[in-house]
Image (cartoon, coloured by chain):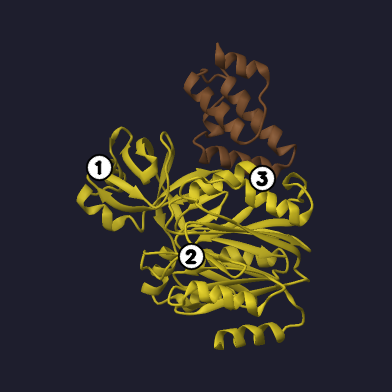
Chain colours: A yellow, B brown
Amino acid sequence: MELKKQSRDAGNNRDGVPRVVVFFASASYDAATLSRQMNEAFPDACVVGCTTAGEIAGGRMLTGSVAAMFLEGDIVADAASAVVENIGSELSVGPALREMERHFQAPVSAWDLATHVGLVLVDGLSGAEERLMEKLGDATDVVFVGGSAGDDLQFRRTFVLDGGRCYSGAAVLVMLRLRRGFEILKTQSFRQAGKTLVATKVDEASRTVIEFNGRPALDAYAEALGVGPELAPPLFFQNPLGLMIDGEPFVRSPQRAQDGSIVFYCHIKEDTELELLRAADIVSDTRMAVEARKAAGEVRGLIDFQCILRTLQLRQEDRCDQYGAIFHGIPMLGFSTYGEAYLGHMNQTSTMLLFR
Amino acid sequence: MAGEIKRMIDSIIDQRAKGNVTVALATKTKLIFKGLNPDRFSGTSPDDPAILAKVRAAAAELGVQLQARSVSNYVH
């Protein structure tokens, strides 16, 4: 009840009525109850959210909380949400997109790419993010950005929330028609180490690379790092691999070594060429990226989908406040994710939606 | 025969982007996620049947029709 009151107060204290309410919640809350209560508190809004591995609001990195953003009519002209269920098996985004087409009374192909942007919140334990993003990318050129729901690092069950309901093994899609426009900021704090590894044998379904450069994956990775195979796993976090696209890495993070193979946090296709990366400073890199966007024009709001691995590093270094301060002066919301989405699925990255 | 893979990939990007540079880059990125890096193919790349099949599948997924010559070369 207290949550409902706070949500209503927050809504009533603002000038307008929210068109969209996005909320991110710790797994310590009952997701089904929370979703219902949020929907009841804002019956006229498109209300969506997910569980997290940490919340970010107003430049503060939080745990055990519920954080929400209210997008009003001056930013969002119209919005529609839809759920893609059973993403682990019969993944089809068609019905969800048709539902949105009915709402907007226009086919996907007619949506203005400059003012329409999609949010995607997906079950973070589904292992289906790559296929979901691929299907969305096949179906439309409208950009989708988002992240994988978390459960406070329990790795048991994550939930996505839409219209008062609660889903697991699903994704919530939200299409926003914006008044002014948007930008996507994808930032990861890594530099190329000058070493290339080609995934020559993979088990895509289990996100495992069996061989790099025709050799056991762990041996080849360790050699690229200049250490013995037994010393490589502790260096995974600081040295992920990058799928380089026009000089920008899409980070693929090693999770663990397994019988000479390496299990990653996302799929790697056979014959994919990857660059070894070296960690740089998250705070200064992200600050520079955000400042550059601020310098280019007013940022009226921002949603940050921040990898839990970045958050864990910031917590370890006691730099959460420094990270939060990057967003000073920008109304913002975010959460620590189990994976980030923008054109595809990636790791150790922040994908951000900036409202202009 | 050579160069067909590049021609087909270029056609996918052109048809999808319709002159929009941002969409062209996004389509290139989507192709790379599908395991087809446009930068790895040139006008002299051999027409590897396995890769041609992969490109054709990607085109179908992206809803792009490739011209008959591409299909014909692939089939024969």
The residue shown at (61%, 29%) is: B9
Find the distance from the CA under tag 1 to the CA under tag 2.
38 Å
Name the residue nearer the viewer: A340 or A104.
A104
Residue B1 coordinates in the image, percent (x, y): 55, 12
Whether labels 3 and 2 share one chain? yes
Q: Is residue A269 visible?
A: yes
CA neighbours of label 1 inside 10 A, class few (<14), some (14 to 19), many (20+):
many
Amino acid type, label 1: Asp
Q: Earlier in the sequence, mark 1 or mark 3?
A: 3
Amino acid type, label 3: Thr
Residue A58 lies in what quarter of the image? bottom right
Q: Earlier in the sequence, mark 1 or mark 2?
A: 2
Residue A136 coordinates in the image, percent (x, y): 60, 47
**Quadrant in which the C terminus of chain A is drawn:** bottom right
| Number of marks present in the image shown | 3
* Left or right of A135 on screen, residue A28: left
Find the distance from the CA under tag 1 to the CA under tag 3.
40 Å
Amino acid type, label 2: Phe
Element class at badge 1: helix
Find the distance from the CA under tag 3 to the CA under tag 2.
25 Å
Q: Which mark is residue A140?
A: 3
The residue shown at (61%, 73%) is: A332
Name the residue carrying label 1. A219
Nearest-to-viewer mark from 1 and 3 = 3
Name the residue nearer the viewer: A154 or A180.
A154
The residue shown at (30%, 56%) is: A235
Q: Which mark is residue A159?
A: 2
* Left or right of A140 on screen, residue A342: left
Nearest-to-viewer mark from 1 and 2 = 2
Q: Chain of mark 3?
A: A
Q: Earlier in the sequence, mark 3 or mark 2?
A: 3
User: In this picture, is B39 found above or below A112?
Assistant: above
